[in-house]
Image (cartoon, helix red, strand yellow):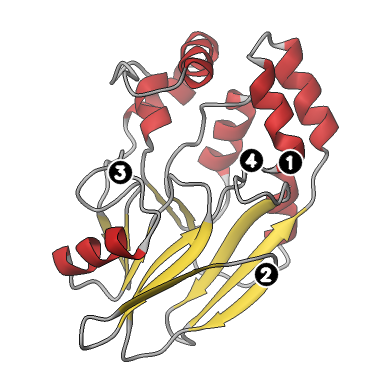
């Protein structure tokens, strides 16, 4: 996250958006939340399913064992101010400026949107021009034309995608903390609704140092190992 924030400070933007899961898998949740709480910018934040479980608002019944252990570890280690911050995060969907923000989908923060069939159902449920979502850890863009035809594609590496004004969009910027598209670099995007562009960035960071912190904290080794491969 430090690498991404350092990179983004050289970019022009109007607001910072986090689509949930501030915490959940790594060993420095307080450092992450401290930085995001105090970041000097206009901020639009919503909660993710790991945020929900990490503050005891859910039991994580659908989590795999490593994710459940990490959520329980995070719950024990969060500072009081950061716990309160996560507890108060709004549940999506959240309308802000030209965007609809959600974690999984507008109707379910736990829903995974992987393919055009999923995207089609979301387009049918909202008339928002641009929906921003997370949860899958995969950078991707889906779009629908005026006849209801949906198309989607993964975004590989750094890329500038030009958006068409006669289409509506469902955009996932990928994951800062745990990419899963076999590219280990942190992923984020800058979406400009006036210029109609979505620019995706991949930022290298010190993976070995992050892995060492995870292992030192006693978290499951799989959470460290997967960072090397972006899986």
- For mark 3, does the 10 Å Cα neighbourhood hold few (<14), some (14 to 19), or many (20 or more) residues? some
Q: Are marks 4 and 1 in contact (CB under 8 Å)?
A: yes
Quadrant location of residue 50? top left
Residue under label 3, please give it: 111
The circle drawn on residue 101 is: none
Label 2 to label 3, Cα distance in Å?
A: 31 Å
Label 2 to label 4, Cα distance in Å?
A: 28 Å
Q: Nearer the viewer, mark 2 or mark 3?
A: 3
Residue 115 locus on image (x, y percent): 38, 59
In this picture, is 27 found above or below 108?
Answer: above
Q: Nearer the viewer, mark 1 or mark 2?
A: 1
Q: Considering only order in the chain, which callout, 1 or 3, is on the residue closer to the N terminus?
A: 3
In this picture, is 101 found above or below 184?
Answer: below
Q: Considering only order in the chain, which callout, 3 or 4, is on the residue closer to the N terminus?
A: 3
Q: Residue placed at 66% from the left, 22% from the top?
A: 222
Residue 123 locus on image (x, y percent): 23, 68
Q: Nearer the viewer, residue 135 or 84?
A: 135
Label 1 to label 2, Cα distance in Å?
A: 28 Å
Label 4 to label 1, Cα distance in Å?
A: 6 Å
Q: Considering only order in the chain, which callout, 3 or 2, is on the residue closer to the N terminus?
A: 2
Q: Are marks 1 and 2 in contact (CB under 8 Å)?
A: no
In this picture, is 63 found above or below 32?
Answer: above
Q: Residue placed at 41% from the left, 89% from the top?
A: 164
Residue under label 2, please give it: 11
Q: Residue placed at 18% from the left, 73% from the top?
A: 127
Seen from this angle, which residue lies furthest left? Answer: 125
The circle drawn on residue 231 is: 4
Residue under label 1, please give it: 229
Q: Considering only order in the chain, which callout, 4 or 2, is on the residue closer to the N terminus?
A: 2
């Amino acid at each position: 996250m430090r690498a991404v924030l350092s990179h983004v400070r050289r970019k022009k933007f109007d607001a910072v958006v986090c689509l949930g899961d501030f915490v959940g898998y790594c060993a420095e949740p307080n450092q992450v939340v401290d930085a995001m709480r105090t970041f000097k910018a206009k901020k639009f934040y919503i909660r993710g399913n790991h945020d929900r479980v990490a503050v005891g608002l859910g039991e994580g019944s659908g989590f795999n064992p490593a994710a459940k252990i990490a959520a329980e570890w995070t719950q024990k280690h969060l500072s009081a101010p950061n716990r309160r911050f996560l507890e108060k995060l709004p549940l999506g969907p959240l309308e802000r400026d030209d965007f609809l923000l959600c974690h999984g989908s507008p109707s379910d923060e736990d829903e995974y949107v992987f393919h055009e069939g999923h995207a089609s159902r979301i387009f049918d449920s909202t008339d928002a021009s641009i929906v921003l979502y997370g949860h899958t850890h995969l950078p991707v863009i889906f779009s629908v034309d005026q006849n209801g035809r949906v198309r989607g594609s993964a975004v590989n590496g750094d890329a500038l995608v030009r958006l068409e004004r006669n289409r509506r969009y469902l955009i996932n910027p990928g994951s800062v903390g745990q990419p899963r598209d076999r590219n280990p670099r942190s992923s984020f995007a800058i979406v400009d609704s006036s210029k109609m562009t979505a620019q995706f960035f991949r930022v290298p960071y010190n993976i070995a140092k992050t892995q060492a912190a995870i292992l030192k904290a006693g978290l499951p080794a799989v959470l460290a190992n997967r960072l090397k491969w972006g899986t």
